[in-house]
Image: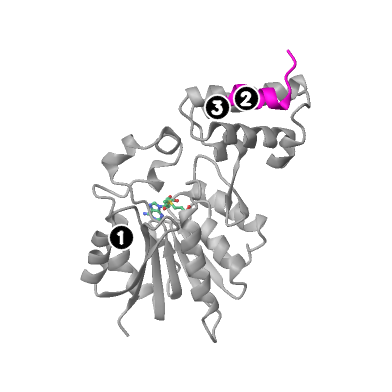
Amino acid sequence: MQMTVLEVIKRSAEFLEKKGVDSPRLQVELLLAHVLHLPRMGLYLNFERVLSPAELDEVRNLVKRRGQREPLQHIIGTACFWGLEMKVNNQVLVPRPESEQLAELGWQFLNGIQGTPPLALDFGTGSGCLAILLAVKSPGARVVAVDISPEALAVAQENASRHSVQERVEFFQGDGFVAVPAGRRFDLLVSNPPYIPSAEIATLDPEVREHDPRWALDGGAEGLDFYRRLAREAGEFLRPGGRLMAEFGDGQAPAIRQIFEHEKWIVEAVKADYSGRERILVVRRAD
Ligand SMILES: C[S@@+](CC[C@H](N)C(=O)[O-])C[C@H]1O[C@@H](n2cnc3c(N)ncnc32)[C@H](O)[C@@H]1O
C-alpha cells in the first residue's frame, strides 16, 4: 500500500492518541523527520511525497515503539540540551529542559571567576549534559563528573567527545564523593540528583517509570536522601567562595532549604523555572 507523508502523519497521530501519548502529531512528525532525514519543517514541503516501502516499514516500527510508551529520545537516540545534541539510551536520564537553567546559572558563575582556571564538579552526571554544557559555555573551566553507573559514564564520555570537550571533562565512577580524586576542591558543585520519593515512581508516566533508570530517579522515602548527603558532605569539596547549585522537585524547596541550613549552609537563592516553580537551590559556606 502506498502512503504519502501527510497520510502517515494523520494515521500515526490517531494511533498514538489512542495509546495515550502526549502531543501525538508532533511526536509522529519528529519520528518521520528522523526516518526521512529531514528537518521537521521539511515535512510540510513534502506532504504529497510517497514513502518507499522501506521508509514506511521503518516509520511503522518506530511509531509502534512510541505507542508502547518508549520515549521519543530513546527511539531516535538523542535529546537536545540547550541546543546541543546528546546521545541517550535507557542507561541515562533523558535531559530535561528544567536542568538547562541549572547549567546556565553554573556557567554564569564560572565565567565570573577571576584568576585561577575554574573547576566544577557535576555530581550524578548521567548523560553528561550538565558537565558538558558547563565546559562548552565556560571555555576556561575544567569539569569533574561522577556517577555511580559505569554505563551512564560511557554515554557521557561519548557526549563529551561529540562536543569536543573531552580534554576538559574528566569522568569518575563511584558512590558520590568517594569517586572524586583525593585533594580536588571545586569552585562550583552542580547536581541534579535523584529526587523522586520511592513510592511515587510507580505513579509516573510509563516513559519515565519504565525507561529512565531507577537509580536516576529514586531519592529515597521522601526524595530527599541526596540533598542530605550533599548538605553533609559537599562543604569540604568547595574552594573558598564556592557555590553548590542543586536542582530539586516540585514542592521540595522548604524541606531542602531546611536540610542545608541545618548543616550551616547559607541559602543564597532559590530559583524558579520558566513556569514559576521553585527548582534550583544556590548555597555557599559561611566565609
Ligand atoms: C536525575 S539523574 C541526573 C542526570 C544528569 N545530571 C541530568 O541532569 O540529566 C541522577 C544521576 O545520579 C546518578 N547517581 C545515583 N546515585 C548516585 C550515587 N550514589 N553516586 C553518584 N551518582 C549517582 C544516577 O546514575 C544518575 O545518572
Report the side of 194 relative to 48 (left or right): left
Residue for badge 1? 227
Quadrant in which the N terminus is drawn:
top right
- Within 10 Å of the Cα at label 2, are there few (<14), some (14-19), or many (20+) other Cα atoms? some
- The one of 220 and 54 positioned closer to us in this rendering: 54
Residue 65 numbered mark, or none: 3
Residue 207 percent location from the top left of the image:
45, 35
Q: Cα distance, mark 3 to mark 2? A: 17 Å
Q: Main secondary structure of the magenta part?
A: helix
Residue 169 percent location from the top left of the image:
57, 64
Which residues fall within the magenta stretch? Answer: 1-13
Report the side of 244 relative to 106 (left or right): left
Residue for badge 2? 10
Q: Amino acid at mark 1?
A: Tyr
- Cβ at disc 3 under 8 Å from ligand 1: no
Is 24 drawn above or below residue 180 in the view shown?
above
Is 248 drawn above or below residue 233 in the view shown?
above
Quadrant in which the C terminus is drawn:
bottom left
Asked whether residue 4 is in view, the answer is yes
Residue 170 percent location from the top left of the image:
55, 64
Q: Secondary structure at mark 1?
A: helix
Residue 59 forms part of the magenta stretch: no
Q: Amino acid at mark 2?
A: Lys
Report the side of 163 relative to 149 (left or right): right
Is 83 drawn above or below residue 237 in the view shown?
above
Which image quadrant for residue 254?
A: bottom left
Q: Mark 2–mark 1 contact, CB under 8 Å? A: no
- The one of 18 and 253 positioned closer to us in this rendering: 18
